[in-house]
Amino acid sequence: MRRREFITLLGGAAATWPLAAGAQQAAMPTIGFLNGTSLQGYGHFLLAFRKGLSERGYTEGRNVSIEYRWAEGNYDLLTALAADLVHRRVDVIAATSTPANVVAKAATATIPIVFTTSSDPVKLGLVASLNHPGGNVTGAVTLNVEVGPKRLELLHNVTPTVGIVGVLINPDRASAADDQLRALRAAAHALGEEIRIFRAETESDIDATFTQLAEQRAKGLFVTTDAFFFSQRDRLIRLADQIAIPTIFDRREFVAAGGLMSYGGSVTDVYHLAGIYTGRILKGEKPADLPVQQSTKVELMINLKTAKALGLTVPPTLLAQADEVIE
């Protein structure tokens, strides 16, 4: 090769280096979205998450990509799903169920994590404190333990006769349910109710629970917050219909599926808050400097069709308090 040709070639190659470097710098950031349940029923939660992102200047597919990983209610899959996101070197992990929070935290100490949970993030070991999270984790918390006694009271108001109320918990999350159970026992005592604990972590466990509820002639069922129960909501409602037992849950999706009532913190709100935090982290802020946000929004939903099928009368004062009534 002639010297002049070589210099021309070298100059042309050098001219492309800044362009290549610029393209590399402009690469689209990636969010790893990890959840213990399934996409079904999560559409409006994702809309809230994306809304939060958009408020910080990020739109999926335009200037940010999202890698979704759903465990479909099988918590054993979460470790592998989280490891895959870490292997892909995503820029932020949005861990949007309590089991996913814990697994994501164990999977990486360097990739920023934004959680949504209804449990105490300090007790879960996610953060050092709410105001000063420390480390690579922060997020948003919805009300849960605080509203449990009110949830029991609402069930009592529509089933005023004293009797047994079943409380369904997932033994995989027994520690997360401890605080709620203590509050429920105190509330049950004040209402003159008797609560009995039923444990389910598989579909067959759920089936067995309803057999026992029928045998014990329970007057109602209180279902605690859990991603597995959310993924099994259709099964829970179908079995409740079969034994004609009034139910109360933590979120509206159960009521939309045919449950009697739900009362709990706004999951939509915490997803929105998580989206905002994810956007802020993508812009360079550190999780350690972002205090855990606590949503104070609560929502009451009532299904009058289900109440009528159960032969129950919902007090007008209760209907007036509802955020949504399904007729």
Image (cartoon, grey):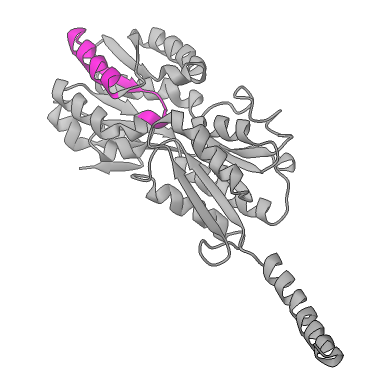
| 280 in the magenta segment | no
The residue that appears at 59% across and 49% down in the rendered structure is 88
119 over 139 or under it: above or below = above
The residue that appears at 38% across and 33% down in the rendered structure is 73
Horizontal placement of 103 versus 248: left or right?
A: right
Horizontal placement of 291 versus 9: left or right?
A: left
Pick whichever, 248 or 58, lies toward us: 58
Q: Is residue 317 visible?
A: no
Pick whichever, 52 or 67, lies toward us: 67
Residue 30 at x, y = what percent? Answer: 58, 55
Residue 238 at x, y = what percent? Answer: 19, 30
Q: Is residue 227 visible?
A: yes
Residue at far right of view: 3
Magenta range is 203-228
The residue that appears at 69% across and 57% down in the rendered structure is 283
Residue 46 at x, y = what percent? Answer: 45, 50
62 over 285 or under it: above or below = below
46 over 142 or under it: above or below = below
Pick whichever, 37 or 1, lies toward us: 1
Q: Quadrant of residue 39?
A: top left
Q: How many marks?
A: 0
Q: In the rendered image, which quarter contains the C terminus?
A: top left
Pick whichever, 92 or 271, lies toward us: 92
78 over 159 or under it: above or below = below
Residue 181 at x, y = what percent? Answer: 45, 14
| 214 in the magenta segment | yes
Q: In the rendered image, which quarter contains the N terminus?
A: bottom right
